[in-house]
Image (tube, rainbow, N blue to C red):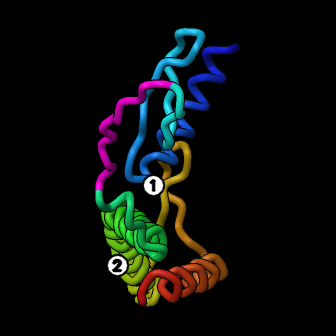
Amino acid sequence: MRSSVRFVVLACVLAAASAQAQVYKWVDENGKVQYGDRPPDKAKAAPVGVMPGPADARVAKPDDWKQKDLEFQRRKIERERQEQGPRAQQADANRAAQCSDSRRRLGLLQEQIPIYQRNEKGERVYIEDQDRARMMDELRGSIAENCR
């Protein structure tokens, strides 16, 4: 406990000392090393060289964190756009293929020729007129949705 208190006091003294010009070191009556910004009158004190921090740390710009946050947000948005790029291109390609297929199938249905589908047994089942009209409406909806 005592050593941690000494460490905290020492850290505070050194932090305060960085704002001051000089730090002194001396040994007290109990033989313990002490640090301070003013030497005691009775003890022999020696100045301690304290290294200053980097110039940027001493002169902090108040708007610097705002600029860093803006840069971070910009990089985040750019990274998301790059990740979505291939997905968006794939979605556009799928939409274009769906558009082309729907137009082709609608053209076949509009020709009024007999059209069949295969059932689960593999047999031909011809499309009736009411099913043809329903399928054409579905294809027109697909074209409206995918062909932009």
Q: Position of residue 5 (x, y in %)?
A: 66, 23
Q: Quadrant of the N terminus?
A: top right
> How far is mark 1 from mark 2, CA to CA?
74 Å
Q: Quadrant of the C terminus?
A: bottom left
Q: Which residue lies under the disc numbered 1?
A: 19
Specify whether 145 is left or right of 147.
right
Residue at point 36%, 30% (across, down): 46
The magenta stretch spans residue 44: yes
Q: In the picture shown, does residue 146 fall above or below 37?
A: below
Q: What secondary structure do most residues of the magenta stretch adopt? A: loop
Q: Magenta part of the protein: which range? A: 43-54
Residue at point 42%, 35% (across, down): 24
Which one is in front in this view, the residue at disc 1 or the one at disc 2? Answer: 1
What amino acid is at disc 2?
A: Ser
* Neighbour tally class for label 2: few under 14, some 14-19, many 20 plus, Cα within 10 Å: some
Q: Is residue 57 visible?
A: yes
Q: Position of residue 26 (x, y in %)?
A: 45, 24
Residue at point 56%, 39% (across, down): 12
Q: Position of residue 23 (x, y in %)?
A: 42, 40
Q: Which residue lies under the disc numbered 2?
A: 100
Q: In the picture shown, does residue 82 fall above or below 107?
A: above
Mark 2 element type: helix
What amino acid is at disc 1?
A: Ala
Q: Position of residue 126 (x, y in %)?
A: 53, 67
The residue lying toward the viewer, choosing from 39 and 111, is 39
Mark 1 element type: helix
The residue lying toward the viewer, choosing from 100 and 16, is 16
- Determine which quarter of the picture holds residue 132: bottom right
Q: Is residue 115 visible?
A: no
The magenta stretch spans residue 79: no
